[in-house]
Amino acid sequence: MFNNCTLKKKDSITVRKAFEKEFRKLPDNLKLSLTYDNGTEMAQHKTFTKNSKVKVYFAHPYSPWERPTNENTKGLIRDYFPKGTDFNLISKKQLKEVQNQLNEKPRKTLEYESPLNTISRLYMNQNFI
């Protein structure tokens, strides 16, 4: 799906531009909305919506159940990299291997299809919505 996107800075303008760049790669029917957390790096959300036409929603503070896929994915990543891992010490090759493994792992929420298969199918059938 998305390439490894390493940001040199994590300020709101840099984050917005990175999101815009990655979202341009998706067909319109796959970028209807995005749910942010409440970090200051998300302060450019109105500009992001204006530029990308993607609606932005915010999860309530301390309400991880409002972003279940995000929380599940963080848990899967922790199987490979425990909390506190210094990602500066992890090679891009290692990250790409984990990314590929996770994208090929079947998920209950996708009716036991992998994210890679799901996104591939949706790309091929862009009129699904």
Image: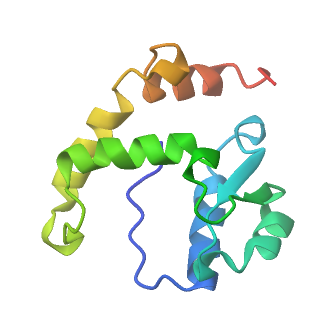
Is 4 left or right of 22, judged from the image as shown? Answer: left
Question: In the image shown, does 18 or 78 lie closer to the viewer?
Answer: 78
125 over 78 or under it: above or below: above
Is 45 left or right of 116, judged from the image as shown? Answer: right
x 77%, y 59%: residue: 56
Q: Position of residue 107 (x, y in %)?
A: 43, 23
Question: In the image shown, does 57 or 45 lie closer to the viewer?
Answer: 57
Quadrant for the C terminus in the image: top right
106 over 15 or under it: above or below: above
- Give the quarter of the image for residue 112: top left
Is 117 left or right of 38, judged from the image as shown? Answer: left
60 over 17 or under it: above or below: above
Q: Position of residue 4 (x, y in %)?
A: 38, 58
Q: Position of residue 28 (x, y in %)?
A: 77, 41
Q: Which residue occupies the extreme front position in the image? A: 62
x 53%, y 20%: residue: 110
Question: In the image shown, does 39 or 62 lie closer to the viewer?
Answer: 62
- Give the quarter of the image for residue 103: top left
